[in-house]
Amino acid sequence: MASPGGTSSGSSLLQTSGSEEDLQALMDQKRQKRMISNRESARRSRMRKQKHLDDLTAQLNQLRKENSRILTSLTLTTRHHSTVEAENSVLRTQMVELGNRLQSLSEILHCLNGNTAITSGLFCDGHQVNNSFSNPWNLMYMNQQPIMASVGNMFLY
């Protein structure tokens, strides 16, 4: 009786130790698979991260180019605006000068048409008008005088 029990318990120890070794080998194999899976997952994660970084770098370069283009456009537009403002200022000045000339010439014509001329000078409504205006050749000369205003002189004041 002792021998069958001893034999059976001896073979069961062999089976148990064999099962433990198989179990250990199976656990090692699972651990190895998990390590490989984790490495692959980490590699994919690094690749996604690198792709994201590359995309952001490309976007940054694109935005810098666009920003540069916009700044160039703004600079050109600002220069154009300054030029137009200067031209407008010159035109306003010329308009005022021409308006004053027109007013003076209208007053002279009014006086000449009213026949209130005196031989020593031209008087109209109690005011003496310059003799150069009474000569038609002088009037023609005055109409041909250019109005001089330059953009460069405007920025000095």
Image (spheres, helix red, strand yellow):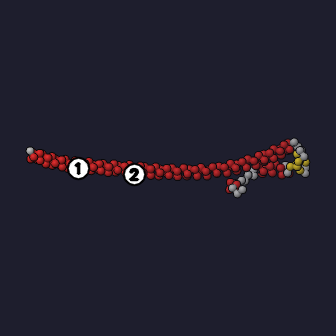
| Residue at x-position 46% and y-position 49% | 59
Relative to 56, 36 lies left or right = left
| Farthest-out residue, front | 1
Give whichever of 144, 124 is nearer the camera. Answer: 124
Earlier residue among tags 1 and 2 = 1
The quadrant in which the N terminus is found is top left
**Mark seen at residue 65:** none
Give whichever of 147, 68 is nearer the camera. Answer: 68
Relative to 1, 55 lies left or right = right
Which residue is labeled 1 in the image? 24
Give whichever of 65, 136 is nearer the camera. Answer: 65
Residue type marked 2: Gln
Which residue is labeled 2 in the image? 50
The reply to whether residue 152 is in sight is yes
| Residue at x-position 72% and y-position 56% | 157
Q: CA distance from mark 1 to mark 2?
A: 38 Å
| Residue at x-position 56% and y-position 50% | 73
Report x, y in % for residue 136. Answer: 82, 48
Report x, y in % for residue 47. Answer: 37, 50
| Label 1: how many Cα within 10 Å (few below 14, some 14–19, many 20+) | few
Report x, y in % for residue 104. Answer: 81, 47
Give whichever of 141, 128 is nearer the camera. Answer: 128
Q: Given this view, does label 1 or label 2 mark the residue nearer the observer? A: 1
User: Is the C-beta separation of discs 1 and 2 under 8 Å?
Assistant: no
Q: How many marks?
A: 2
| Residue at x-position 83% and y-position 52% | 132
Label 1, secondary structure: give it: helix
Residue type marked 1: Gln
